[in-house]
Amino acid sequence: MKKVHVFNAGPCLLPQEVYDSAIEAIRDFAGTGVSVLSISHRTKEWDAIMDETRALWKELLNIPDGYEVIFLGGGASLQFLYVAMNFLEKKAAYVDTGVWAHKAFKEAKGLGNAVEIASSSDKNYNYIPKGYEIPKDADYLHITTNNTIYGTELKEDIDCPVPLIADMSSDIMSRPVDVSKYAMIYGGAQKNVGPAGVAFAIIRTDALGKVSRYLPTMLDYRVHIDKLSMFNTPPVFSIYVMHETLKWIKAQGGVEAIQKVNIRKAETLYNEIDRNPLFVGTAAREDRSLMNICFVMAPGKEELQDEFLAFAKAHGIIGIKGHRSVGGFRASTYNACTQEDVDALVACMKEFEKLHA
Ligand SMILES: *Cc1c(COP(=O)(O)O)cnc(C)c1O
């Protein structure tokens, strides 16, 4: 296979070991002689995978008692609705840090009284709002910890006087998290913990059951908790690959070890962006994401953008075109992206500089 360096924003690169075990499981799942694509989800072999997957989540994120982890279809986008259905009674507060945060807000607004209490839309979401007041009468505060499109990240677990709910689609398992500060954490798996097709939710169970609206069965978190994520047929293959990805994270030394590598990768690339006169970063320095690194051509060099994309592609660098709402470039340096991948991109930026010095 051609040697390439993949910086796709999602679905993300996964470790080679995960691809290999997925291929093996398609041939023969757990020595059963049946493909993972065709096994019954009502078998003891599958139950073992579900149990282990939940246990790995709890172990890797040090999830305290009182929380449950569930797996659902519909991506993070359906979680936007689930959250409002299951938690919004009188008032919900949202922090607007980009397209995804705003989409989450929109679903709450459609169901009841939701307010955006802070926003960074004034600067095209290039920073994380700070110092805003959280209404004490809110049922919950919703935040998006990593803004995949804009490359900003809230890297700490904030104190919040009301239940805190976080979309961690694109930075889950990239660092240790103090889960006890959240009523709920959710996301789509395909940014950092698996392939597309499954979403995860970590929920403090005593935060549920406080709304008076009718909850359709499939949209009631309590049903999925009671049925251990198997009320209906779960996304079997996606969960299997997530299981393998979590095992890989554990084998790397867990999220603390992964975080060290992520910090080093991000520093390598940000240092080059700051040094290289052809490029500039777009996110405010203190809020720079370790997962999605956004940059553009320096002022006066804009016409080189397409040439750099083509140059990078010719050097095996894949997936660095920025999102259309920011432009320029975005390198997603999720867990499976290696220091070697980042070094290859940096070498390419240096070579490009020589051509245009
Ligand atoms: C990608 C992304 C989403 C949307 O995820 P889907 O699974 O495609 O619905 C939501 N929030 C964030 C932060 C994302 O990066």
Image: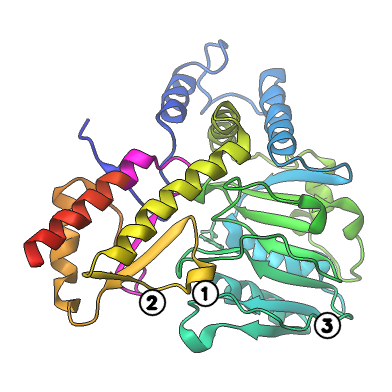
Residue drawn at (70%, 22%), measured in percent from left and top? 48
Residue 350 at x, y percent in the picture = 19, 56
Q: Which of 42 and 149 lies nearest the eye of the viewer? A: 149
Q: Where's the C terminus, which quadrant?
A: bottom left
Question: What segment carries the magenta color?
Answer: 323-342
Q: CA distance from mark 2 to mark 1?
A: 9 Å
Q: Which of 125 and 226 lies nearest the eye of the viewer? A: 125
Badge 1 is on which residue? 99
Q: Is residue 93 above or below residue 60?
A: below
Q: Is residue 61 above or below residue 177?
A: above
Which tag, 2 or 1, sits closer to the chain's start? 1
SS majority, magenta? loop
Crowding near the residue tagged with mark 1, few <14, some 14–19, many ≥20 C-alpha atoms within 10 Å? some
Q: CA distance from mark 3 to mark 1?
A: 23 Å
Q: Secondary structure at mark 3?
A: loop
Crowding near the residue tagged with mark 3, few <14, some 14–19, many ≥20 C-alpha atoms within 10 Å? some
Residue drawn at (53%, 47%), measured in percent from left and top? 197
Which tag, 3 or 2, sits closer to the chain's start? 3
Camera sees residue 193: no
Badge 2 is on which residue? 325
Q: Is residue 39 above or below residue 81?
A: above
Amino acid carrying label 1: it is: Val
Is 303 inside the magenta-drawn segment?
Answer: no
Residue drawn at (71%, 56%), measured in percent from left and top? 185
Residue 305 at x, y percent in the picture = 19, 70
Q: State whether label 1 is within 8 Å of ligand 1.
A: no
Task: Left or right? Give the position of 356 relative to 129.
Answer: left
The reply to whether discs 2 and 1 touch (Cβ–Cβ < 8 Å) is yes
Amino acid carrying label 3: it is: Pro
Ligand 1, what quadrant?
Answer: bottom right
Badge 3 is on which residue? 135
Task: Left or right? Give the position of 94 relative to 137.
Answer: left
